[in-house]
Amino acid sequence: MKKIKHYIKELLFIIITVTILTNLLSLYKSKTLTHTPLTIHSIHLIDNSLYMIKSNKPILIHFWATWCPVCKVEASNIAFLSKYFEVLTVVVKSGDDTKVRKFLQEHHYNFKVVNDKNGVLASAFKIAGFPTTFIYNKEHKLAFSDVGYSSTLTLYLKMLWAQKE
């Protein structure tokens, strides 16, 4: 029993340390991101539909890539959030629409996707690493930005906060 308690304490220490380090890294990397209000009002999705960004509603914009291992782990978090909040994802330099649609179907993801084949949109947002997530409040002012993995709970709470701003 003593060994089990020791291992649990060690595991908790590692989890807390990794969490702190990843948050510090995210904070450092997010300094270079664009912090201007969201100016996009509509954009074409991978399914060729025109997506209109709703006014007076917070939105999460998530930049990711099919070749990014952390993005693959975080994708289920984004899929979950897209059921409850306004979520727009931007897949960057991951191939043509057919390749991206195949990836989405294989993983059973149905969130809204913009294919940024050449990274033009990512450059406009000054994306330095993947995944990168922006959360805008109801007035479409930046409330939060994260570089790297974010848990479902963290993103959920940030979206709730953005609704109240």
Image: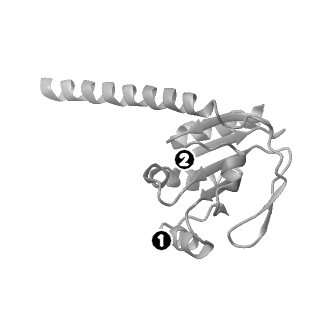
- The reply to whether residue 56 is in sight is yes
Q: Is residue 13 above or below residue 47?
A: above
Q: Which mark is residue 106?
A: 1
Name the image quarter holding residue 114. bottom right
Q: Is residue 129 above or below residue 29?
A: below
Q: Name the quarter where the C terminus is drawn.
A: top right
Q: Give the image location of residue 90, x and y in percent.
A: 64, 56
Residue holding disc 2: 131
Q: Please tell me which residue lies in front, 38 or 7.
A: 38
Q: Give the image location of residue 80, x and y in percent.
A: 57, 53
Secondary structure under tag 2 reads loop
Q: Is residue 130 above or below residue 105?
A: above
Q: Residue at x 66, y 37 (%)?
A: 33
Secondary structure under tag 1 reads helix
Q: Please tell me which residue lies in front, 153 or 144.
A: 144
Q: Residue at x 43, y 53 (%)?
A: 69
Name the image quarter holding residue 26. top right
Q: Give the image location of residue 110, x and y in percent.
A: 60, 65
Q: Amino acid at mark 2?
A: Pro
